[in-house]
Image (cartoon, rainbow, N blue to C red):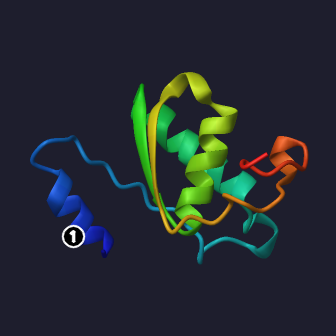
Amino acid sequence: MRSAHAVDALKNNYRVIVPRLPIFDLPIQHTNIKYLVRVLNDFIEWHQLRDVTLVGHAIGGQVALMYAYTHPANVNRIVLSGSSGLFENSKFDGGHSLRN
């Protein structure tokens, strides 16, 4: 499902806000999940959003997972579709995958 289709399906029952992650606009030293989480956090703080439901696909799912891990008090739910980061060992969780 393309993101526009997902937004159309959700917008009648939910407030849908789609932040633009600058994945292709970043200098090489900032093309990592940790930096994208910082961008997402800045967006959420700027808009004063609370108890958010994060919906992530592919790398967006990995950003959602790490955001929830680093800012758990601000996340109500996570919806993942085809997300990376579910079974890989990751530095942000001490090298343990989420299935351990």
Q: Is residue 48 visible?
A: no
- Determine the residue located farthest toward the top in the rendered image: 73
Question: Residue at coordinates 62% horizontally, 57% vertically from top-left?
Answer: 62
Residue 16, percent from left and from top: 26, 47
Q: Quadrant of residue 22?
A: bottom right
Rendered position, 14 above or below 7: above
Question: Residue at coordinates 74% horizontally, 52% vertically from top-left?
Answer: 34
Location of mark 1 (residue): 5
Q: Is residue 89 left or right of residue 47?
A: right
Q: Amino acid at mark 1?
A: His
Q: Quadrant of residue 7?
A: bottom left
**SS class of the residue under badge 1?**
helix
Judge by depth and name the residue closer to the eye, 72 or 48: 72
Judge by depth and name the residue closer to the eye, 14 or 23: 14
Residue 83, percent from left and from top: 56, 64
Residue 75, percent from left and from top: 49, 31
